[in-house]
Amino acid sequence: MDWPARSPDLNPIEHVWDFLGRRLAARTLPPVTIRELRLALQDDWAAMPQQLIDTLILSMGRRCETCLAVRGDHIPY
């Protein structure tokens, strides 16, 4: 399958980054130093539900089919 150049929808890591970004933003005391950021990301990574990863993996077939149906453009939500 040709990789559609304009489709971040096929990159599951984008959803992982979104999860981590939301967790960081929800902290009452955001990390101030690089060390604090690293530790916060490690904590949030460890807290990531396995179901999130499983859902991303299992949704790839549907994502690919939808992306092909819209000719490589973004998947409409």
Image (cartoon, helix red, strand yellow):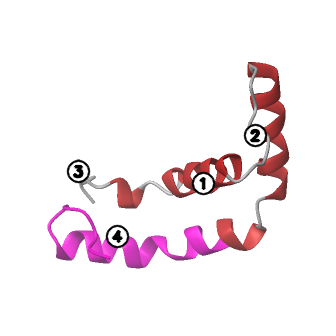
Q: Which mark is residue 16?
A: 1
Query: For this rendering, which residue is in front, 41 or 11?
Result: 41
Q: Amino acid at mark 1?
A: Val
> Circle 2 sits in a helix, a strand or a loop, which is it?
helix
Q: Residue at x 76, y 49 (%)?
A: 27
Disc 4 target residue: 64
Kindly indicate whether the residue at mark 1 contacts the one at mark 3 (C-beta within 8 angstroms).
no
Q: Nearer the viewer, residue 20 or 70?
A: 20
* Mark 3: few/some/many CA within 10 Å (<14, 14-19, 20+): few
Amino acid type assigned to the residue bearing label 3 in the image: Arg
Q: Earlier in the sequence, mark 2 or mark 3?
A: 3
Numbered label attached to residue 61: none
Is 72 left or right of 38, judged from the image as shown?
Answer: left
Residue in front for this viewpoint, 65 or 51: 51
Res. 6 mark: 3
Q: Position of residue 33 (x, y in %)?
A: 76, 20
Q: Earlier in the sequence, mark 2 or mark 4?
A: 2
What amino acid type should be assigned to the residue bearing mark 4?
A: Cys
